[in-house]
Amino acid sequence: MMTKELLKIKMREYYALLGVLFASFLVSVSLGQYQNWDALTEYGAASGVIQWGFPYTSPGILINQPPLGYYIDALFFKTFGLSYETGVWVTTLFGLGSVFLVYEIGKVLYGKRTGLVAAALFGLAPWQIIMSRTFLIDSQSLFFSLLYLLVGIWAIQKSSLKNFLVPGILLGFALLTKAFAVFMLVPLLLVYINRRPKNLKRVIQEAALFFSPALVLNLLWYEVITEEGAFAIFRHNDFSTYLSGQAAPSSFFLANYFVGNLGIFFIAACILSLFLSLSQRRLLSKFLVSDLFCFATIICILGFDAFLVLVKNLLVPYISVLKYTYPALPAFCWLASSSIDKCCSLPHWKNFNRKQRVLVFSIAVAGLFFALATIGVNMTRLNWLTKWNYLIFVVEGEYGYSFNRLLPAWSNTQIAAIQGFAFVLASLSLAWFNLDKLKSIAQHFKDYASARKEDTDE
């Protein structure tokens, strides 16, 4: 039976999460809606489901993407009316679902504190906010990707053969939404390998049970229903549009994009967090594995985009880095936010001398500061976005992925008030949940200051 103290902790955990979710929702709706050519094309495909029963962009012409998202959109259109606004509400709901899943996966990989900070970082990131307020299938794809990752980790932890079927079905749904869902197999595979399975027969059974639903669902759509062939997705226009002579991407185009759109604080938090785990492998061994999972996911996603641009010379992966690397955003958030659980674990070590403790603790606190400062920077940038009806996520020079803003029903003053309230709500939610640890960290700072003073006096 749950004790009173445990119930209190659980309530504080989920009240804090609700605060973060509500803050993300308020900021999202405050910006209004966004659209671009891709969004209007996908809206046409979802409308085609209503008119013809298939995601046709024009009579008889299927959109060259997996279909599930458009059928989900059509269900909402049937219920609430066919309009672009309804479609945006669908992406917003899936975006909020992704914020919740970022929390849950962060909790499994690191701990509740990391999960909560990661959810706040993700839910208030301009990148995520804009994607959740534009009618793009990417929002649904990321949701299903994170969902099969979470359920897959649970299945691996339970070590029950039948449990592999559910994440396998969810993988099928994710791949039927967008092929980029395949990238969440990277952390899931690493979690599985880390379990060190020894029975080859059992490994084959689990793999068959996991991948069979995805194979059946995709073959059913591409081979039986549409008769386009299993490799139709690889005939997408993105893979046949090449860079012209004017567009000359540098080898650092991804670095330029992430520094410009995630920010220096965010990148610094990720680097310090990873450095801390690598440099203190014994002390932080329980975090190092999860850090490497996140890092490997980021490298695979960014490496794929770099391959398409720098080796295959493709245009769309260059100007659309925002979409091609979108699945990496949660991994960045988990990595940056893990500093808080690392900070909380540091007081438990005993074998370091005073200088080592000060150095390690300072690095951990710096990483945590950068992660939390990113939330404030993001809110400032989101407020700045309300002043413009055109937005471009720049990659290099004039190249990038652009949006047009459909104005909301509020004035800029009202929007600023809503966003200010959301920032306060998110900050209080994080502070409330981490109040005990904040006191502990403050006490350690006092102890270190006292120790340094004693050394000076001597």
Image: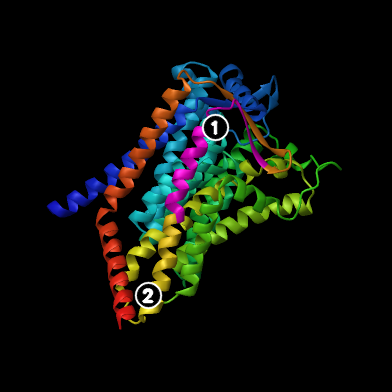
Quadrant in which residue 22 is drawn: top left
Q: Which residue is drawn at 42% across and 39% down?
A: 97
Quadrant in which residue 323 is drawn: top right
> How many neighbours does mark 2 have within 10 angstroms: few (below 14), some (14-19), or many (20 or more)?
some
Residue furthest to the right: 245
Which residue does the numbered mark 2 point to in the structure image?
357
Q: Where is residue 326 in the image (x, y as percent from the top left)?
A: 57, 45
* Dominant secondary structure of the residues highlighted in magenta in the image: helix
Is 369 on the left-hand or right-hand side of 83? Answer: left
Q: Residue at x 28, y 50 (%)?
A: 433
Is 220 on the left-hand or right-hand side of 19? Answer: right
Q: Is residue 285 something one can see in this rendering? A: no
Which residue does the numbered mark 1 point to in the structure image?
385
Looking at numbered disc 2 in the image, what kind of residue is underneath it? Arg
Q: Residue at x 77, y 49 (%)?
A: 249
User: Where 77 sits versus 433, above or below?
Assistant: above
